[in-house]
Amino acid sequence: MSKVIISCAVTGAVHTPTMSAHLPITPEEIAQQSIDAARAGAAIVHLHARDPADGRPSPAADVYMKFLPEIARATDAVINITTGGSVAMTLEQRLEGALRASPEMASLNMGSFNFAMFKMAERPRTWKHEWEQPYLQATEDGIFKNTFKDIKYILQTLGEGHGTRFECECYDLGHLYNLAYFIDAGLIKPPFLVQTIFGVMGGMGADPENVLVMKQTADRLFGKDYVWSLFAAGKNQMAFGTMGAVMGAHTRVGLEDSLYLGRGRLATSNAEQVAKMAAILRELGLEVATPDEARAMLALKGRNNVAFI
């Protein structure tokens, strides 16, 4: 593989405003950081929405529509909208933005799991907003729910109904087998993006051996029908992105997954992380894929076939 797709997860629903002044919150900030990330080399921007008043994760389609058109006007990046939302949202809420936008891509968690963020609430902080600490603490007794019925509903309503293709997020080995079930059922067709994820508490740990296990399993289940990407959360972001690239994977960075550029150094923007990963790829003798090259690899419906341009 010579062309590597860089995805950038711009804001997410994990980190809270207290953790970094550089985390984009308002529609204007999300739009500008997405545009800058695309200019730095991200072919795909993966997007959540936040309440501009206090930064809490928001499912509101009206909020998405305040930044999606701006990003589309300024870049040709593939726009990928979450169907994961946050652990506090219902399935209907999680789909609100994507169903309004009818994007080329959307994320899709391939199973339920204990998406735990409560350890982040234990560090002494002066919280900016009253919602932040309780939101994180609640995940000690919470679960991200995506049952087989939920996944089928998303694939039928957003996939078949809108022509949206998916970033199939696999946080554990069993998620690959869940994905195989939906392929056999004819609801996911090749080429499909398999995003293997490491280092999220409750999912597969960020151990190099786990990368090989996930890759070997995916090869056995999917053969040549899939496009492989990986990322690790937190401190392992750049190391795992580099390891994955050496092994033939595409990669994802962004402030959703890590707030840092290096040890003890907060990233000042998503673009800064993208630029660092792009530089690493070039040092490895690899090229950074353009948005149109990513569209071709993933057989996407095209940027003009969305509902926000």
Image (cartoon, rainbow, N blue to C red):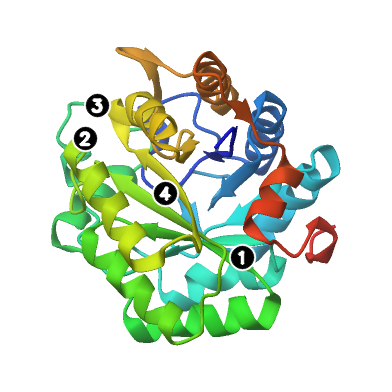
Q: Which residue has dot 3 on it?
A: 125
Rate crowding at label 4 as few (under 14), some (14 to 19) or many (20 or more) other CA atoms within 10 Å.
many
Q: Which residue has dot 2 on it?
A: 208
Taking 217 as reference, is 162 left or right?
right
Q: Which of marks 3 and 1 is nearer the N terminus?
A: 1
Give the mark toward the camera: 3 or 1.
1
Residue nearest the observer in this picture, 178 or 78: 178
x and y percentages locating residue 222 in the rendered image: 40, 66
Q: Which residue has dot 4 on it?
A: 13
Q: What residue type is labelled 1?
A: Gly
Q: Which of marks 4 and 2 is nearer the N terminus?
A: 4
Q: Which amino acid does label 2 sit on?
A: Pro
Helix, strand or loop at mark 2: helix
x and y percentages locating residue 103 in the rendered image: 69, 63
Q: Which amino acid does label 4 sit on?
A: Ala
Q: Earlier in the sequence, mark 4 or mark 1?
A: 4
Location of the C terminus by quadrant is bottom right
